[in-house]
Amino acid sequence: MADETTNPNSIGIVATEVVDLTLPDGGLKLRNGGVLREVRVAYEAYGKLSSGRDNVVYICHALTGDAHVAGYHSADDGKAGWWDEMVGPGKGIDTDYYHVICANVLGGCMGTTGPSSINPDTGKPYGSSFPDVTVADIVHVQKLLIDELNVNRLAAVVGGSLGGMQALAWSILYPDLVDCCICVASGATLSTQALAFDAVARDAIVSDPAWAGGDYYESDNGPDWGLAHARKIAHITYLSPESMQQKFGREKREQEPRSKNRHYFQVESYLDYQGKKLVKRFDANSYLQITQAVGAFDLAEEFGSLEKAFEPAKCKFLIIGLSTDWLFPEEQSIELAEALHRAGKDVSRCTLEAPHGHDAFLIEIEHLAEAVRAFLPWVTINSKPAKQERLELDESKAKSFNLILETVAKGSRVIDLGCGNGTLLSLLKEEKGVRGFGVDIDVDRVITSMDKGHNVLQMDLDEGLSRIPDGMYDYAILGSTLQVVRKPRTVLREMMRVAREGIITFPNFGTWSNRVTLALRGCMPKSDTLPHEWYDTPNIHLTTLKDFIELCCLEDIRIVDVACLPGDKFLNRLLVSMNLCNLGAEKVFVRVTGKGTIDRSAPSCRVSR
Amino acid sequence: MADETTNPNSIGIVATEVVDLTLPDGGLKLRNGGVLREVRVAYEAYGKLSSGRDNVVYICHALTGDAHVAGYHSADDGKAGWWDEMVGPGKGIDTDYYHVICANVLGGCMGTTGPSSINPDTGKPYGSSFPDVTVADIVHVQKLLIDELNVNRLAAVVGGSLGGMQALAWSILYPDLVDCCICVASGATLSTQALAFDAVARDAIVSDPAWAGGDYYESDNGPDWGLAHARKIAHITYLSPESMQQKFGREKREQEPRSKNRHYFQVESYLDYQGKKLVKRFDANSYLQITQAVGAFDLAEEFGSLEKAFEPAKCKFLIIGLSTDWLFPEEQSIELAEALHRAGKDVSRCTLEAPHGHDAFLIEIEHLAEAVRAFLPWVTINSKPAKQERLELDESKAKSFNLILETVAKGSRVIDLGCGNGTLLSLLKEEKGVRGFGVDIDVDRVITSMDKGHNVLQMDLDEGLSRIPDGMYDYAILGSTLQVVRKPRTVLREMMRVAREGIITFPNFGTWSNRVTLALRGCMPKSDTLPHEWYDTPNIHLTTLKDFIELCCLEDIRIVDVACLPGDKFLNRLLVSMNLCNLGAEKVFVRVTGKGTIDRSAPSCRVSR
């Protein structure tokens, strides 16, 4: 029931519209040489289109999806659209701001032209004569649809799984139309394992005698067994093993066992149900068509490399992986994001904790909505205010931030390793016009940084920056992070590899107060910069300024500048002013460059007050 | 070719023997009520049987395996047995020491009675009339086989995958016959995901019209499509996604494409080949029978819990998981081993790095052979010496070990957290008759400890000892490990939960020399007990004796005894003798008990010289 009391944020009652595309003479030419004389598209659209027609979010659906993204089809419709949790007033894709469009894909069977449509040349269903479609063709039809709707700019293209592939294709094929591309639980191609599952599943359809080479529409039976079987295989890949275990375990169903040993497990019954359900609403030829389009999608192969594929793209990208998705594993979203990064694009990436596997992009979306909201540009419509960026400057960090701001040249390329909430990146952008890039291990911090408009990759520094090319940045900044990584030496090497200069700040364990605490009190020191107890400190590699200088010598890293932050204590200030930096500096700022002359003498330190 | 120059460690030419079992009157009764009037078993046996008939290793094969474990069937036989790399002279299961037996399973089609055998009642193949078999029936027939061979003791039962389930069943069903049980890449039941794949695969066989309800032996065609399809699904689950990606990627085959868009991928071709290959050598009804037996195997359900299931077992267990096995994920071997541990059994467990997935127990076995060799008991036959246990006592550890030996009561239950190479466990066993249990994160150390005869579980202390019951041990020992874990406080709590007393040794950061180094030299101290540079030290939570006492107070842990190890330095000894332990002790030994009176004053420390 579309009851607004139980679902106050529903977009309400919506309808699927149908449009016959205006095609060029000769019809729509497809990538693989086929031609369609007529193309009908089924779509839905919600939210007010702005006067500038610039607030459109185009949503691309996955394999067996349709145009019905959100809301209900009638007052007594019990089932909301497939992404109702994400799309609606106040939701992740907020229809108070955005005009949402979604259409059934070409080759599908939910209203848009596909193999079960009538072939105008014969007056009968296409069946085996339906030409092969590709993801590029699917996106081409979407472009013709928005032309038809007088929309010539997309604030964002968003999709999960196959929808994510379509979003990527949009960014490449129509670079001037797309502002943002959000690709969830997807990749630039299928993994070999996913290819294998799809191939085996398709084999079940075409081996079903009722498939009849694809021309089964006029017979009594279609390849129902084959389609259901294909769906069952695929459905296993949509769920995480853990969620399957939790949901079904080894529970058995009471159902005429064919033998004492042949249990009918709950999970089997569930898959049987999923298979039957799909057969009722989906066409086997469409299933073949679309999975083949997915299987053939390979941006790296098509363009030579992922970097080349994305060369034309102009939009910002958000790539989201799901922690337990094994159909499109996290690794694929990392590869995709890092290729975009290497190609010099604006890209952010994160992995969301999602216990339910690939399907989670539909069913577990709290964090997802947050990430999408943080990434999307906000447009002013109605009376609601546009998103305000606000710098929350931590006072104790102000001094080291100032030193960094003094150091970084205008307009330079900066990577901030351990960027936290993105405050430093915001300062660098505002005051130095820097196009910064953030890296952080924590997804909440990644989302907060994205919300401030920055590009951020979720990354564990200890696992290396190996996919970032040498010398890609002017500066790599490692602010208060050296002491929390497991492999500080490796991180230091890596930052010197990817950037011309390094800026490191770290708490100095060598202060007189730390020395006195250990020497006279016999316990591990705590201080403003090292405030944790020994047993729960994230600071697992304590070091002094002197130690750090030694390591730089060892690594052939030239120290250009050292500045000492004495903190509040009078004695600290005094010591630092006497150039006794290692005794007086609570925190140290060091600017280094790659291999150069090694100066084993302690550099003269600047005092920063 | 069985060329001994290229394969010097082959067992050589072997033959499959056949024996008709002597059955009780009325035939062999099966678990599910079926009866077999005749049972023939095909088996192979290698290596000399000792005069005491006590050197038998029984190997259980997996789903589609057979009795032919190792060696060649003839001089021009190009294909060695399925586990030839593991079984032979000088190999993991060394036929110079052991007499190896392996038989084809009941219900199979490789010589042992199964659905394709002739039903003596009808003179025709059993087909649909073959009764359902279970893993227990399979093992029962193996027991009857060894009876027939006059063997009444098994030095070990070994198996991978389904073979591992058989090995577990042996330990429960015939506890007095089995000395060791080795269970590789297996579990006490199938995961829900594996159940689902098997169910879908079986559905392809029984949905193949040629299956004919199981009675296809006298028709021209069997359910070849269904069997091949089932195999293809299963084969995907045998490989790790990474190895599939590496092996096949998205490579395409030149083979009459049905359409431009329908690529024929190399992985598809490989799976087609695997399907066809199985059809040539395997029977569809046997496939159904055996996978159903696997699906029905559930020790926890059958006996109420895993702990209860293993109550009768008397043997030692070795449970091995493979890092990229997703058919029997590592988690299942952990659950199994921890249940055995809770049930008070002798059990060791480790996870081996195996890039190739589930199949790796056959194809990547270097580490596996080592682990099996370390675990197996050595029996003296021929002239080769039996395995010698040798204590390699690290001199610098001798003192803290002595303190521990003085503390631990005779015959008590001890868990050594971070047991290293098992040296302390060996000392405790020799001198105190302690039945110790080891825990270590490193697989090499686990294997070395097993080699010394200890029970060791591979475990990351930071992930908790949560599956070890409260108060299971008299002593938990944490030797030089507190400072390397990420969560020392949690580890301390956990050790106090599982044991009545705790013994902790750790390097003391509070020594005068450390204090002087930091105070006067301004750099991170190094010492005999803390020898690493700050940037690559595993010691990530440095602490002093004083700090540690504070933490114990905070945690309501009562300190019973503190002993100080001053090391070699004169001044250290002097300071310790003056009861200035935190200044003089390079290393500290602390004995604690659970919640008790809190004494915030520093305890008086013993001096250990």
Image: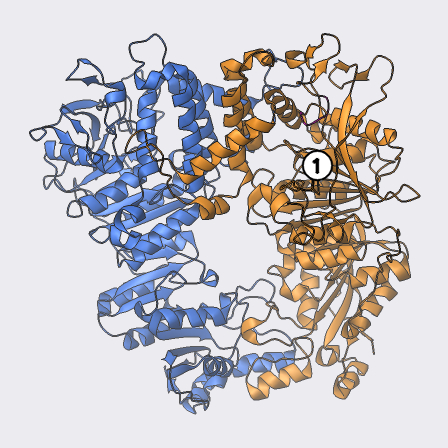
Chain colours: A blue, B orange
A539 vs B186, nearest the viewer: B186
Q: Where on the picture, by quarter, is residue B362?
A: top right
What chain letter is assigned to the residue under label 1? B
Q: Residues within 10 Å of mark 1 (few under 14, many from 20)?
A: many
Q: Which residues are magenta?
A: B109-113
Image point 25% across, 75% down: which residue? A409
Furthest residue to the front?
Answer: B76
Image point 63% across, 51% down: which residue? B352
Furthest residue to the left?
Answer: A25
B585 vs A325, nearest the viewer: A325
> Could you tell me residue B91's position as x and y percent?
73, 51
Judging from the image, what secondary structure is the residue with disc 1 in?
Answer: loop
B230 vs A531, nearest the viewer: B230
Amino acid at circle 1: His
Q: From the image, which quarter does the C terminus of chain A lie in?
A: bottom left
> Could you tell me residue B112's position as x and y percent?
73, 25
> Could you tell me residue A604's position as x and y percent?
40, 90
Furthest residue to the right?
Answer: B52
- Res B99 seen here: yes
A495 vs A372, nearest the viewer: A495
The answer to whether B99 is drawn above or below residue A579 in the figure is: above
Q: Where on the picture, by quarter, is residue A557?
A: bottom left
Q: From the image, which quarter does the N terminus of chain A lie in?
A: top left
> Could you tell me residue B558's position as x and y percent?
76, 61
Q: Is residue A367 magenta?
A: no
The residue where tag 1 is placed is B68
